[in-house]
Amino acid sequence: MVTRDTPWPEGAPCWADLGVNDVKKATAFYEGLFDWNIQEGPPEAGGYGIANVNGRAVAGVGPKMGPAEAPTMWMTYLAVRDADATAAKIKSAGGQLMVEPMEVMDVGRMVIAMDTAGAVFGLWQPRNFSGAQRVNEPGTMCWNEQMSRDFEGSKAFYASVFGYEYGDMSGGGFSYATFKVEGRDVGGIGGLPADTPAQVPAGWTVYFGTVDTDASVARVEGNGGSVVRPAQDSPYGRMAAVADDQGAVFSLISVSTE
């Protein structure tokens, strides 16, 4: 378990939020899955709510940005000290800005970008809100990874923008590297397996912790969601990929409560 009230290091995943057509439906789904308490913000927040675990912010849920046909998805945000300067680096490295640097009330400055492989992610420059206040425990963000069909190109892009160093975990036809911030592994970049259907796009995945992965998968299905990849054991915990009842994909991983 990690609790934090200060800004996250440059380039570290610091927040995740969900953009959906039906916020009330999403609130019911995730409060039922993770025992979150989702509090809607003030009117100027436009329906955006903050999910809390034991009184600490862990994720956001709000209306989709853009047209209704935009994908329903979880977004990973990377911490930055200067959103405008990082946005310029993204463009210089061949990425695109989908939402130019903008103020979010008095809480921070945000950018939405697309990397050279087509994966969408956010930047967060904190002001009065630094991001996730609890991580690496049940019901909170535990890992974030970018998967694409251009493993080497993606590594080069993020190294150029954020200065990442990598720990290679590839092997057996599988390409994967952890990216490091201040010498610590904080996320991953990987290649989509060769048998991945063509319609599956590059993207960032958010992993949420759970005490019992199989029980959480059953709860997802019972609440109208679906299984994308069945639960399986790994050296890091039992993992599964699922989709909520509006189609947003995320992953579950077992974590210790000690």
Image: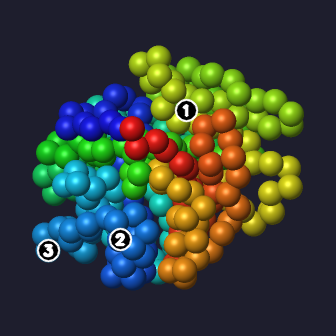
In the rendered image, which residue does mark 3 sit on?
Answer: 43
Q: Is there CB contact under 8 Å for labels 2 and 3?
A: no
Name which residue lies at 80% across and 57% down. 196
Q: In which quadrant of the rendered view does residue 151 lie?
A: top right
Q: Which residue is situated farthest in the front direction here?
A: 258
Q: Residues within 10 Å of mark 3 (few under 14, many from 20)?
A: few
Q: Look at discs 1 and 2 and give the one toward the viewer.
A: 2
In the rendered structure, which disc, 1 or 3, sits on the residue that comes first in sequence? 3
Find residue 158 and name its label. Answer: 1
Give SS at disc 1.
helix
Q: Residues within 10 Å of mark 1 (few under 14, many from 20)?
A: many
Give SS at disc 3.
helix
Find residue 31 and name its label. Answer: 2
What's the CA distance linking mark 1 and mark 3? 36 Å
Q: Is residue 247 visible?
A: no
Q: Look at discs 2 and 3 and give the one toward the viewer.
A: 2
Q: In which quadrant of the rendered view does residue 105 lie?
A: bottom left
Name which residue lies at 53% across and 56% down. 212
Numbered marks: total: 3
